[in-house]
Image (cartoon, rainbow, N blue to C red):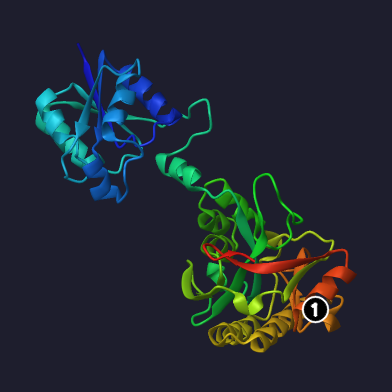
Amino acid sequence: MKRIFVSGCYDILHAGHMQFFNEAKALGDHLTVCFASDKVLWTHKQRRSSIPQEHKRALLQSLAMIDSVVMGDNLELGLDFQDHFMQLRPDILAVTEDDQYGELKRALCARTGASYVVLPKTPPKVSPISTTEVVRWIRAPEAAPLRVDFAGGWLDVPRFSKPGGLIVNCAISPLVSLSSWEYEKRSGLGGSAAWALLNGQDGVDSELNLGVGWQDPAVISETGLCVWSSGSRPTLHLKRNGDMLKQLMALLYTEEEHDTPEIAARARNYQLIYDASIVAGEAVLREDVGRLAEAIRMSYRAQIEEGMNPLPHRESSQACKYCGGGWGGYAVYLFQSANDRDAFVERHAQAKAIEPFVRGYGVS
């Protein structure tokens, strides 16, 4: 009888695990599965098990391809299964091709005479998923904010980052959900980042892979009125709840779509963008709406220099600018009073009142 041994956390069983178990069993006659104990999970992953470990044992034992189940309790990184392996001395240790502890496991096999077999990660019939992705899906919120940016946009794109530069933005309500989306799509409000968050995904890497910046997923996950340091990854410099902006903001849709990747390579005045970011950071620190309006006007001037069409109805507000990279989508307008904002929204069919949003503080 040829005995096969596999090990893993198996914290949340999914179709990829089933595929691996079936392929491992096909290598021999008897399959032993070792799962990491709660103590091992906490020590090496810094998270609790999804279900009590004895329930996990029962689930694994119920699978037809598995012949026996043991629990790994050894705290040596990558070798929690070592004690059982040395006692059982199986013929084959099967691993997946992305196993992080290959050298340790090969050495263990050499000590016992077992064969070390690497199985390719064959995609299951459903879309492949990892335990980490399942956890993100479980933790995904039912609703998420979008965002407006006031200054420093483009300084969050790694190749355009500038030491000392800032990115100043604010998460906004009304919120969006997978079933309710009150905004136009492709509109410069970070919708792709919100969609990723709602689907349990990490939006920062996906945005960077598109060749654009990280500010959308960063502020949509963080929420609040935020000041970030320019750089290759998000670093929060300052955060406020956004009360200074209550009843002072509106969006105006330009009736043109917005596409950030398409415009990333355009020439633009990065010095003016940088200068505006410093002014905006000071405004948030001092909770000075007038100073923030100055930063927005500077950002808008950079957009006009880039060649964007002048925004309409500028005289109604303290300041306005295109959201995101501009050239379409929404523009954010900042007003001196709630009455001015409400009158603007009432006059213009494409205008929408928005409020700052910070998780745990309530929707304005």
Q: Position of residue 101 (x, y in %)?
A: 25, 42
Residue located 77% across and 56% down the image: 184
Q: Say if 360 sits above or below 39 in the image.
A: below
Density class for disc 1 (Cα within 10 Å; few <14, some 14-19, many ≥20) is few
Q: Position of residue 308 (x, y in %)?
A: 80, 73
| Camera sees residue 307 | no
Choose between 258 and 141: the one closer to the eye. Answer: 141
Q: Say if 75 sits above or below 220 in the image.
A: above
Q: Which residue is mark 1?
A: 339
Q: Determine the image quadrant of residue 321.
A: bottom right
Choose between 231 and 228: the one closer to the eye. Answer: 228
Q: How many marks?
A: 1
137 left or right of 173?
left
The quarter in which the N terminus is drawn is: top left
The quarter in which the C terminus is drawn is: bottom right
Q: Determine the image quadrant of residue 89.
A: top left
Residue located 52% across and 25% down the image: 125
226 left or right of 99?
right
Choose between 202 and 210: the one closer to the eye. Answer: 202
8 left or right of 303?
left
Helix, strand or loop at mark 1: helix
Give amino acid for label 1.
Asn
Q: Position of residue 333 (x, y in %)?
A: 76, 75
148 left or right of 66?
right
Q: Position of residue 233 (x, y in %)?
A: 47, 66
Q: Determine the image quadrant of residue 61.
A: top left
Residue located 59% across and 74% down the image: 242
